[in-house]
Amino acid sequence: MLQETGTEWLSQEVKTGTTIIAVEFDGGVVLGSDSRVSAGASVVNRVMNKLSPLHDKIYCALSGSAADAQTIAEVVHYQLDVHSIEIDEDPQVRSAATLVRNISYKYKEELSAHLIVAGWDRRDGGQVFATLSGLLTRQPFAVGGSGSSYVYGFVDAEFRRGMSKEECQQFVVNTLSLAINRDGSSGGVAYIVSIDEHGTEEKVVLGNDLPTFFDQ
């Protein structure tokens, strides 16, 4: 059986079976993701960064088909660059999320991707938007990917409005660690991006440094 199915992954779609999360804090946002990319039951990339910049202070977290999600991010990145030149200032986070929503809806039959858009702008500060097949909604936090179903209870119980930047970073790391432990399609390292009015901070937490819980 193993010999018969050993090369099936070569013809399967590469997916970021994944865990992604974004959360608002007073003055900014924190995004996080794992780094495992799979094709069927095979892991094809252990350290993919699924947090893609759309503009200086706007990022998106990718899940679904790796090719589809990356294509949407690249198209929106280009469109935001043009938009920012036209208006002669940084674009709004809602504008980026709307572009992602429009592409996702227009090509909903062809594309298989879910992006969480988060960032900071002068008008509304830190914002998190969930986009899925025409949906556009602002949330204080959002989770997605195959690992999200394992951590909904944790994030609902642990999230508190008014958390500091550091508390949000730890909240994101804890969520990713739990998802990685339970979800076979999530794994690798944790990528963390923190965005506020002062700029963007990127960090990588290695698998050995992720927090451990009672069953690990």
Image (cartoon, rainbow, N blue to C red):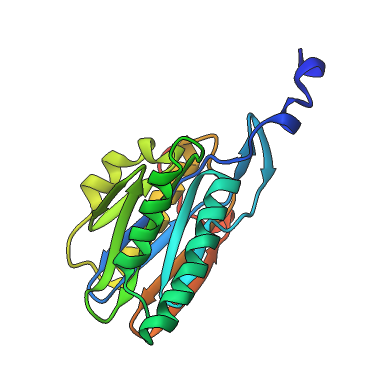
- The residue drawn where x is 27% and y is 39% is 153
**Residue 216 visible in image:** no
Query: Quadrant location of residue 127?
Result: bottom left
**Residue 22 visible in image:** yes
Q: Which of the two residues, 158 or 36, is positioned nearer the viewer here?
A: 36
Q: Which of the two residues, 85 or 61, is positioned nearer the viewer here?
A: 85
Where residue 31 appears, as percent x and y from the top left, is 40, 62
Q: Check the image and report above or below for 148 versus 95.
A: above
Farthest residue to the left: give it.
161
Query: Quadrant location of residue 94?
Result: bottom left
Where residue 131 appears, as percent x and y from the top left, is 34, 50
- The residue drawn where x is 26% and y is 76% is 27
Farthest residue to the top: give it.
1
Q: Which of the two residues, 153 or 52, is positioned nearer the viewer here?
A: 52
Query: Quadrant location of residue 89?
Result: bottom left
- The residue drawn where x is 52% and y is 69% is 78
- The residue drawn where x is 79% and y is 27% is 7
Q: Which of the two residues, 56 or 68, is positioned nearer the viewer here?
A: 68
Q: Quadrant of the N terminus?
A: top right
Position of 37 compared to 114: left or right?
right
